[in-house]
Every structure is written in structure tokens, then in C-alpha cells.
Amino acid sequence: MTNNLHETNIVEVTGKIVSPIEFSHEMYGEGFYNFYLEVPRLSETVDVLPITISERLIVNLDLKEGKYVKIFGQLRSYNRYVDGASKLVLTIFSRDIKLLEDEKEIKEELKSPNEIFLDGYICKPPVYRTTPFGREISDLLLAVNRAYNKSDYIPCIAWGRNARFCDNILVGDHLKIWGRIQSREYQKKIKENEYETRVAYEVSISKLEYIANDNNRIKEAEEA
């Protein structure tokens, strides 16, 4: 993935369309559509990821279930109110799309089908834990700035030595991370003895960089 210095949120995913393309909403006279993309992992399982795309990018494209595409965009978040509570919703916002029809090209693109780069700030204390099998995990929430004074809040998960490192970072710390977007099913308790299967999306971190000269620790030291 080629990182533009002016970009703080870059996504490239390749996969198979596995749902109908449905109208989502209109903004300033421009229509937006949603669909789901099945993106393979190296482990031979798949992630099924939500895509949002402008009507202006899909004109004259034969996009239907079973077609392979490569999406270039950003991972964005917004709040949706469900049953009186605010829920963080994630989607890959497509800024460009490439329809893949040649089998050789599809095979080549699927060698690295899921890449994301984020440059942002920790906005919630990280949660460090170990699994029953002794695997170390840290859950992070990264605030990533975008145009028009907006921000996206991206759940991330670090493993192993990265998880141990994240146990020591503070709210306001500046991180750059590289990884992939993953989908994960979980059980949500609805009523007593009643559970519902839901899907969460998060960034699985493969590499991170701590920006030591740009965080709240420096600012607090200067003010002291």
C-alpha cells in the first residue's frame, strides 16, 4: 500500500460481492449505496465487510453478486441510535472501485486483499487482557481526523508484544497503525436466556508506530 503523507485513513480491499447493491441514503443530491464484500484471509476463512459507494462511481459497472472488485477508500464511523442507545457503526467508504474480470488479475490481487493504514490518536483507555490460552490482546479506540473537522472512531485490536506495549499508552497518544479490517461474530444478550448473534468490525493491527513527539505527555510537561 502506498501511503500519501496527507492521508490518515487508507483502505484497499479486494473480494467478492456477496449481497445485492441497495440504496442507502442521499446527500446533497448524490445517492449512496451499500453492499457486502467477502474478503479472504490467509487462514482460508473470510471477512464479510460493509461497503458504501456513491452512485457516481458505479455508473456502467456490472456490479452484482459473485463479481470481484477492488475497493480504494477509507474506514468511516457514524453513530446510529437503536432502542434509545447510540451504536458505533463502521463502513468502508469507497473513493474508487475497480471491477476485476480477468482470472489472472483476480488471483494476483487476492495475494494481499485487505490492507489499512490509520494515523490517529487514542481516545479511550486501552483494555489489556489475556485469553484462557495465554494470548495477549489489547483493545484500542483510535480517533482519525478527516475533512470538515470530522473524525472517525475506529476500534482496533493488538496482539502479542504490540498488545503488551499498548497497555502502557495513554489517551491522547499519537499512533500510526497498519493491519487489516476483520469481521467478528458475537452473542448479544437481549433478554434472560435469550441471545442474538451480531457482527462487529475492527482493525487487526500487524504493525504500529508510536509518535513520541506528539502526544498529551509532551503537552502536559510543557504546561507544568
Image: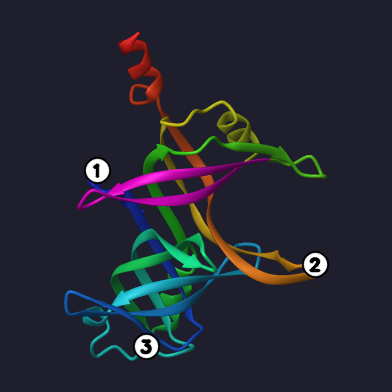
Report the side of 45 relative to 31 (left or right). right
Q: 10 Å neighbourhood of mark 3: few (<14), some, or many (≥20)?
A: some
- In front here: 34 or 43? 34
Q: Which residue is mark 1?
A: 5
- Residue lying furthest left: 29
Give the main secondary structure of the magenta stretch: strand
Residue 45 x %, y %: 65, 69
For the residue marked with disc 2, what is the amino acid? Glu
Against 116, residue 172 (above or below) is above
What segment is highlighted magenta in the picture? 137-158
Of labels 3 and 2, the one closer to you: 2
Residue 115 x %, y %: 44, 57
* Mark 3–mark 1 distance (CA, rounded to whole Å): 32 Å
Q: Earlier in the sequence, mark 3 or mark 2?
A: 3
Of labels 2 and 1, the one closer to you: 2
Tag 1's secondary structure? loop
Q: 10 Å neighbourhood of mark 2: few (<14), some, or many (≥20)?
A: few
Q: Which residue is mark 2?
A: 192
Report the side of 97 relative to 111 (left or right). left
Q: Is residue 164 magenta?
A: no
For the residue marked with disc 1, what is the amino acid? Leu
Q: Which residue is mark 3?
A: 63
Tag 2's secondary structure? loop
Residue 34 x %, y %: 39, 79
Residue 133 x %, y %: 82, 44
Q: Quadrant of the N terminus?
A: bottom left
Please tell me which residue is depicted at 41% across the width and 31% down the height of the picture. 172
